[in-house]
Image: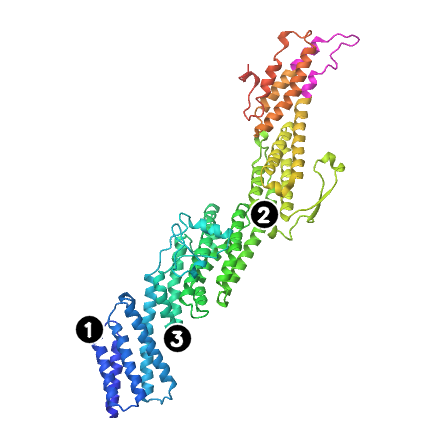
């Protein structure tokens, strides 16, 4: 009898070994399965056994028959319909319970029950391998396409709906939804179906059974592997490249600027839409398994979110170039806005490294933005010119600085936070009215000046000092005043007509209005005072008599004409870009010059012959209208008649 038992056991081992060969045909597998069942029957008949063991063995043989039948074919169980699938799950669960019953007995090593337990474990392992394949198959073949431009969203509130309906946002793009959500986070995330919703109950059943059977690690790893691929595909669709820090640091600014803009868009979509949906999916599949969903989500998504964060780190450690500041602030604000979402999704211990990395990158980006902002001040101060700016117009540095500050207004709240500890002066500052010659008559006003406002005032002061240095490069004093008038007027107008007004204040505007008007008056004095001196009567009368020296009168008038023509020739090439400022200065100049000329000629009309009157007052007035157009011309070549 013992020899027969050994022979049967050996035959069973051979059948089992042959059955594990994946190259067998379906017919061969069928034959082996039947032979295995027959050997089990022989064992059952030939061995004496108690009633409990016999019942267990009978059940085990039935489970084995059902499980092994699916090992014969190559088709997937769930492809054959839910009835077949759930029947398979029932038999596998029955096998699991048989193991529990056997393990509850006082087993004798080498006894019948011990042999049944070994068979049951082997059978369960076969079933678990199959369920792992089925689980992976369901996840892969039921993936929903991720199309950022065309998709519907499920609000997290909709999880309470029985019909699982999708909330459609019509023609809204995904960016619109993300933007709206970032402004008003009343309903939490927006969820898309990453896997067809019909298979989620099946996936949940498989996961529950595998975890109940102590095969949870295999189930989790299968989920993680599949979803990692899905997350990689999402980044590919969002055009996020895998770049090393060295790659980023070597990149030209135009290319890097484009990649930063793409990163900002990708971060919003990836976190608010895709990661939120990934978290929802893992929570749905592992909903009955405590923290398993959070662990699977974190492990599946960790590499992808860290890939995005690594790009932020590369930007943060790059050189502090002023042209990068806006983009760095964009990255900082986006990450700061997303961190609450990220913290909520990675709330478990397994997500701690992601949460810490986010905070570290945010801090690095903030430090980089602050250093870049402060470097901008140095860049303005060190902008040196060797040659005067042509025409005395608005210098490109003035335009750059003022437009730069205007753009930074959108980031005022962020910059005020980042610049704490780097204030220029006490936060409570005494502000007098800004007209310098009346300052002593005004009452001081105390007001809080934000860190950003303090730095902006410093920027404008440094810019003005720089402009004054550039004005000294002009050999003509008049042109230096015109240059400062143009540039300070541009600064004042830029502040007055933008949100810079809320930062720098009306007092700053009044002060700079006074400054450019002062330079306008200085221009008039430097240009016209000496010319108008030719139209004075002093020294025209002959000594000892009241008679006019006609030769001296003729000489003065001729000198006036020559000086006027020189001014016309040079100052038609000068530039006042602002049309209103140009008109105002022409009118002011005309009032002085034309009135002085008319008065002088009218007073001495009896002493001056017509041939010495080269231009009428109307002629001169028309000539003055040609000034400051940036196109040099001469009186004799003028179109004026």
Residue bearing the label numbered 1: 27
| Mark identifier at residue 212 | 3
Q: In which quarter of the image is the N terminus?
A: bottom left
* Camera-nearest label, 2 or 3: 3
Say if 591 sits above or below 90 in the image. above
- What residue occupies the far right of the structure in this picture? 544
Tag 2 or tag 1, which sits nearer the N-term? 1
For the residues labelled 1 and 2, the Cα–Cα distance comes to 76 Å
Label 2: few (<14), some (14–19) or many (≥20) C-alpha neighbours in 10 Å:
some
Asked whether residue 75 appears in the rendered view, the answer is yes
For the residues labelled 1 and 3, the Cα–Cα distance comes to 33 Å
Tell me the SS state at disc 1.
helix
User: Picture coordinates of residue 527 (x, y %)?
Assistant: 65, 24
Where, by quadrant of the figure, is residue 217 drawn? Answer: bottom left
Asked whether residue 382 appears in the rendered view, the answer is no
User: Picture coordinates of residue 481 (x, y %)?
Assistant: 64, 30
Residue at 68% across / 49% down in the picture? Answer: 427
Quick check: 442 left or right of 35? right
For the residues labelled 2 and 3, the Cα–Cα distance comes to 55 Å
Q: Residue 557: within the magenta?
A: yes
Residue bearing the label numbered 2: 412
Q: Residue 129: within the magenta?
A: no
Q: Give the range drawn in magenta.
A: 530-558
Q: Which of 636 and 227 is in front in this view?
A: 227
Residues under numbered marks 2 and 3 in contact, where contact means CB atoms less than 8 Å apart: no
Quick check: 336 left or right of 534? left
Tag 3 or tag 2, which sits nearer the N-term? 3
Tell me the SS state at disc 2.
helix
Residue at 45% across / 67% down in the picture? Answer: 295
Q: Nearer the viewer, residue 473 or 408?
A: 408
Tag 3 or tag 1, which sits nearer the N-term? 1
Say if 613 sits above or below 484 in the image. above
């Amino acid at each position: 009898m013992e020899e027969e038992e050994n022979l049967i056991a050996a035959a069973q081992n051979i059948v089992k070994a042959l059955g594990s060969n994946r190259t067998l045909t379906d017919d061969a597998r069928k034959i082996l399965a039947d032979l295995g069942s027959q050997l089990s029957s022989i064992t059952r008949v030939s061995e004496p056994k108690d009633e409990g063991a016999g019942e267990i063995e009978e059940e085990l043989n039935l489970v084995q028959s059902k499980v092994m039948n699916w090992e014969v074919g190559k088709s997937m169980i769930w492809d054959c319909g839910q009835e077949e699938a759930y029947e398979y799950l029932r038999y596998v669960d029955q096998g699991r319970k048989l193991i529990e019953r056997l393990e509850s007995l006082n087993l004798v090593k080498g006894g019948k029950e011990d042999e049944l337990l070994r068979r049951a474990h082997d059978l369960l392992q076969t079933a678990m391998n199959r369920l792992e394949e089925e689980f992976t198959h369901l996840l892969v073949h039921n993936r929903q396409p991720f199309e950022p431009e065309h998709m519907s969203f499920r609000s997290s509130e909709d999880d309470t709906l029985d019909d699982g309906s999708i909330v459609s946002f019509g023609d809204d793009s995904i960016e619109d939804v993300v933007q709206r959500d970032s402004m008003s986070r009343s309903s939490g995330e927006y969820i898309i179906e990453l896997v067809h919703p019909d298979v989620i109950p099946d996936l949940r059943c498989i996961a529950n059974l595998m975890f109940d059977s102590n095969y949870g690690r295999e189930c989790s790893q299968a989920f993680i592997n599949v979803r990692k691929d899905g997350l990689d595909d999402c980044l590919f669709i969002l055009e996020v490249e895998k770049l090393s820090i060295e790659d980023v640091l070597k990149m030209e600014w135009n290319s890097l600027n484009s990649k930063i803009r793409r990163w900002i868009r990708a971060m919003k979509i990836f976190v608010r839409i895709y990661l939120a949906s990934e978290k929802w999916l893992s929570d749905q599949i592992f909903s009955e398994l405590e923290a398993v969903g959070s662990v699977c989500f974190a492990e599946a998504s960790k590499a992808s979110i860290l890939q995005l964060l690594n790009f932020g780190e590369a930007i943060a450690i790059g050189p502090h170039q002023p042209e990068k500041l806006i983009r760095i602030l964009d990255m900082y604000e986006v990450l700061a806005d997303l961190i609450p979402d990220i913290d909520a999704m990675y709330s478990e211990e397994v997500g701690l490294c992601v949460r810490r990395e986010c905070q570290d990158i945010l801090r690095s980006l903030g430090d980089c933005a602050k250093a870049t902002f402060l470097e901008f001040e140095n860049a303005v101060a060190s902008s040196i010119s060797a040659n005067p700016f042509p025409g005395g117009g608005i210098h490109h540095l003035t335009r750059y600085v003022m437009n730069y500050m205007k753009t930074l207004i959108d980031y005022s709240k962020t910059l005020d936070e980042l610049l704490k500890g780097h204030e220029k002066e006490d936060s409570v500052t005494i502000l007098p009215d800004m007209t310098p010659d009346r300052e002593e008559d005004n009452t001081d006003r105390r007001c809080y000046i934000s860190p950003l406002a303090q730095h902006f005032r410093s920027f404008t002061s440094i810019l003005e000092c720089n402009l004054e240095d550039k004005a000294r490069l002009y050999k003509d004093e008049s042109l230096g005043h015109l240059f400062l008038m143009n540039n300070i007027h541009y600064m004042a107008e830029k502040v007055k007509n933008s949100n810079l007004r809320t930062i720098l204040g009306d007092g700053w505007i009044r002060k700079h209005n006074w400054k450019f008007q002062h330079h306008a008056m200085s221009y008039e004095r430097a240009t016209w005072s000496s010319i108008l001196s030719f139209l004075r009567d002093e020294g025209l009368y002959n000594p000892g008599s009241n008679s006019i020296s006609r030769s001296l009168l003729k000489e003065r008038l001729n000198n006036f004409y020559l000086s006027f023509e020189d001014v016309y020739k040079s100052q038609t090439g000068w530039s006042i870009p602002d049309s209103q400022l140009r008109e105002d200065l022409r009118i002011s100049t005309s009032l002085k010059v034309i009135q002085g000329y008319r008065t002088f000629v009218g007073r001495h009309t009896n002493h001056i012959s017509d041939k010495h009157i080269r231009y009428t007052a109307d002629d001169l007035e028309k000539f003055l209208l040609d000034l400051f157009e940036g196109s040099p011309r001469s009186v004799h070549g003028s179109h004026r008649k």
